[in-house]
């Protein structure tokens, strides 16, 4: 069999995605590889397909128990014998798994890095032929990354200790140059084939909602997406509880996750989410690592995260199956404050010097700033993300709220001059709210009592709302013409280039949302569908989904592992009538056909 046959037989796919084939070929020719591909790009296939073609066993090192379980479950469903070895098993179970492995029962074994130096593993490794060692989430080996795991260093000794050096393949979605070089170096990859596919996730739609009641918007949004699975991220446990309660009151099938809940409840809630019993999850960022649920149709951020890295990782949990999914950020300037507070309370390891702590704080503040600008930019959101990660992007993607919004341009040079003037006169001691209040001519006590109503520009922009003035200030900060201090009470200073505006050498044009327009002209397509399904197909899709849920409950296998949304949609498009046609559906391999094919055919025939 060749890689294509394996892909079809076990995974049910007709063709490889970009990059997959070249990595597989390199592995099969005996070369080390490093694959850097975004979430959902299909990294697993890159090592699972060659694992089935190589003569010996493939060891996959993976950091998270839940991730391993999921992968092994999915492989077994696809008819591939696989096992995992981690701390969730007893010593007896581990011994049994190794003894079965020695007898050739498994082609792929997932192992937690802590297990590699154990006697049981070492003994096993001496007895069998290991053809490949795969390092999943390979950035965990780099001290540069946020997720460094010292136990990953065990991999190096393990590989060095084998009598015949296997192929080493490493995969990650983290792309910074330092991390990439570190992985190659620390893992001692030998002239690896390095493949970096773009960071873009074309199936994700990005949106920022700015202003208005978050609760009302969120509720409306979730109602519009009823029946779909989504994650709502909040910054604090308190917010998780509040949002969770509000959604429950509105009869949304919702569950929650944060570090304040008992381990038992966390597990139960996570399972309810994974099995689509409660498809909406409200959580802090403690939730998500190791969640492979492929049919998450939206990720909404009730609060802004602390960095673009965090945002893209969390938002990226939407649409892993490649179907359309949405990432919505509910932005409010208060979130900047919450995050500043959380950052200022951040704890550091004792051995860190003041200088090191200072450097980390500076980096954190910079990251938060860049995140904030994402919340306020009028440019293409996808472009902003890609540029942040060092990639070039077209000016417009036509698949984010900014590209789909209509904006009007306005010359705001005079307003900007007054803003600069105001900041100067107030001796650089105030933030955006006060500056906007003074220029608008606010009668608020905090302005009057400070004597700020006596400065020359007080009330000079009375025709412009305070909201708009703050919007302009934020944008000026994004352009670098204003600088915001990083301490608790953010104050504004003039940035480089402000002088040119004051001197009349530069004019400032800004874009504003066209007034009185419905806030978000969402594309008519319902999230989750890439093709144009007619209403009959929709009904069929819903029926197939119900059948999938029933099977999931019967078998204890999560619905998205039975079949992904994408596979169900393909069934609705192709309407297979018999076994051969069913095997033609993307995602239906031979093992899955045997298990579930007939039941789905029967449901389709009911039409
Ligand atoms: P990653 O590990 O890169 O985040 P996965 O390996 O989980 O991504 O793959 C994401 C989804 O894409 C899975 O549902 C997987 O079955 C599917 N997939 C992978 N390769 C292909 C392919 N060649 N054709 C169609 N679907 C694929």
Image (tube, rainbow, N blue to C red):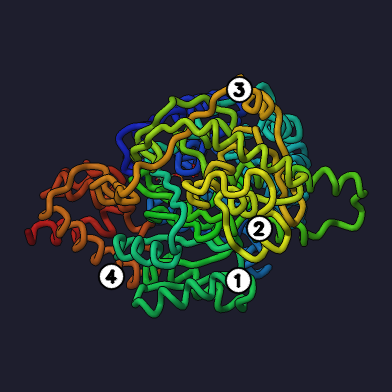
Q: Are marks 3 and 4 in contact (CB under 8 Å)?
A: no
The quadrant holding residue 77 is: bottom left
Q: Which sits earlier in the primary sequence, circle 3 or circle 4?
A: 3
Q: Which sits earlier in the primary sequence, circle 1 or circle 3?
A: 1
Image quarter where the C terminus lies is bottom left
- Residue 589 visible here: no
In the picture, measured across the screen, residue 223 lies left or right of residue 37, that is: left
Number of dots carrying numbers: 4
Measured as percent of width and height from the top left, residue 371 is found at 59, 45
Measured as percent of width and height from the top left, residue 573 is found at 17, 45
Image quarter where the N terminus lies is top left
Q: Which element type, helix, strand or loop, lies under badge 2?
A: helix
| Residue located beneath label 1 in the image | 237
| Residue located beneath label 3 in the image | 504
| Residue located beneath label 4 in the image | 550
Q: Are marks 4 and 2 in contact (CB under 8 Å)?
A: no
Q: CA distance from mark 4 to mark 2?
A: 45 Å
Badge 1 density bin: few <14, some 14–19, many ≥20, Cα 10 Å: some
Q: Nearer the viewer, residue 363 or 465?
A: 465
Check mark 3 vs ligand 1: CB closer than 8 Å? yes or no.
Answer: no
The quadrant holding residue 246 is: bottom left
| Residue located beneath label 2 in the image | 337
Badge 3 density bin: few <14, some 14–19, many ≥20, Cα 10 Å: few
Q: Residue shown at 24%/47% (left/top)?
A: 525
Q: Are marks 1 and 4 in contact (CB under 8 Å)?
A: no
Q: Residue shown at 64%/54% (left/top)?
A: 434
Q: Which element type, helix, strand or loop, lies under badge 1?
A: helix
Q: Are marks 2 and 1 in contact (CB under 8 Å)?
A: no
- Residue 397 visible here: yes
Q: Residue shown at 47%/26% (left/top)?
A: 393
């Amino acid at each position: 069999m060749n890689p294509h046959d394996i892909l079809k037989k076990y995974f049910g796919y007709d063709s490889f995605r970009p990059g997959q084939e070249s990595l597989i070929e390199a592995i099969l020719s005996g070369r080390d590889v490093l694959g850097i591909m975004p979430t959902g790009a299909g990294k697993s296939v890159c090592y699972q397909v060659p694992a089935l073609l190589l003569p010996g066993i493939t060891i996959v090192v993976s950091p998270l128990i839940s991730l391993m379980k999921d992968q092994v479950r999915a492989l077994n469903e696809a008819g591939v014998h696989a096992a995992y070895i981690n701390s969730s098993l007893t010593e007896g179970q581990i011994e049994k798994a190794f003894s079965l492995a020695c007898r050739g029962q498994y082609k792929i074994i997932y192992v937690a890095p802590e297990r590699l130096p154990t006697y049981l593993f070492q003994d096993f490794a001496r007895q069998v032929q290991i053809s490949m060692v795969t390092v999943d989430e390979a950035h965990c080996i780099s001290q540069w990354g946020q997720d460094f795991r010292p136990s990953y260093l065990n991999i190096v000794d393990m590989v060095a200790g084998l009598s015949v050096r296997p192929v080493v393949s490493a995969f990650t979605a983290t792309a910074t140059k330092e991390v990439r070089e570190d992985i190659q170096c620390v893992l001692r990859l030998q002239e690896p084939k390095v493949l970096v596919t773009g960071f873009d996730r074309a199936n994700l739609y990005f949106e920022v909602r700015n202003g208005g009641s978050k609760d009302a918007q969120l509720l409306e949004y979730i109602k519009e997406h009823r029946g779909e699975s989504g994650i709502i991220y909040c910054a604090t446990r308190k917010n998780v509880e509040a949002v969770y309660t509000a959604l429950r009151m509105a009869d949304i099938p919702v569950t929650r996750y944060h570090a304040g809940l008992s381990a038992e409840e966390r597990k139960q809630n996570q399972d309810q989410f994974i099995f689509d019993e409660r498809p909406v999850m409200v959580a802090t960022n403690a939730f998500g690592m190791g969640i492979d649920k492929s049919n998450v149709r939206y990720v909404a951020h009730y609060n802004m995260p602390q960095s673009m890295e965090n945002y893209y990782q969390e938002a990226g949990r939407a649409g892993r199956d490649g179907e359309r999914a949405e990432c919505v950020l509910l932005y409010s300037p208060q979130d900047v404050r919450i995050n500043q507070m959380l950052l200022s309370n951040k704890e550091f390891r004792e051995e860190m010097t003041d200088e090191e702590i200072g450097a980390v704080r500076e980096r954190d503040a910079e990251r938060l700033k860049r995140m904030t600008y994402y919340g306020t930019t009028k440019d293409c959101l996808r472009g902003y993300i890609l540029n942040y990660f060092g990639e070039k992007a077209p000016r417009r993607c036509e698949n984010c709220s900014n590209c789909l919004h209509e904006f009007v341009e306005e010359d705001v040079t005079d307003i900007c001059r007054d803003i600069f003037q105001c900041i100067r006169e107030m001796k650089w001691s105030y933030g955006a709210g006060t500056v906007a209040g003074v220029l608008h001519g606010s009668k608020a006590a905090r302005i009057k009592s400070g004597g700020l109503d006596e400065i020359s520009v007080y009330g000079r922009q009375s025709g412009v709302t305070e909201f708009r003035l703050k919007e302009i200030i934020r944008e000026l900060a994004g352009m670098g013409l204003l600088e915001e201090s990083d301490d608790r009470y953010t104050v504004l200073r003039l940035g480089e280039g402000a002088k040119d505006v004051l001197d009349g050498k530069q004019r400032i044009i800004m874009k504003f949302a066209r007034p009185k327009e419905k806030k978000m002209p969402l594309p008519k397509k319902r999230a989750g569908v890439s093709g144009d399904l007619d209403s009959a197909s929709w009904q069929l899709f819903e029926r197939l989904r119900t059948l999938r849920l029933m099977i999931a409950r019967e078998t204890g296998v999560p619905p998205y592992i039975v079949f992904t949304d994408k596979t169900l949609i393909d069934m609705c498009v192709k309407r297979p009538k018999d076994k051969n046609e069913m095997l033609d559906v993307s995602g239906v391999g031979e093992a899955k056909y045997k298990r579930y094919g007939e039941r789905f055919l029967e449901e389709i025939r009911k039409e």
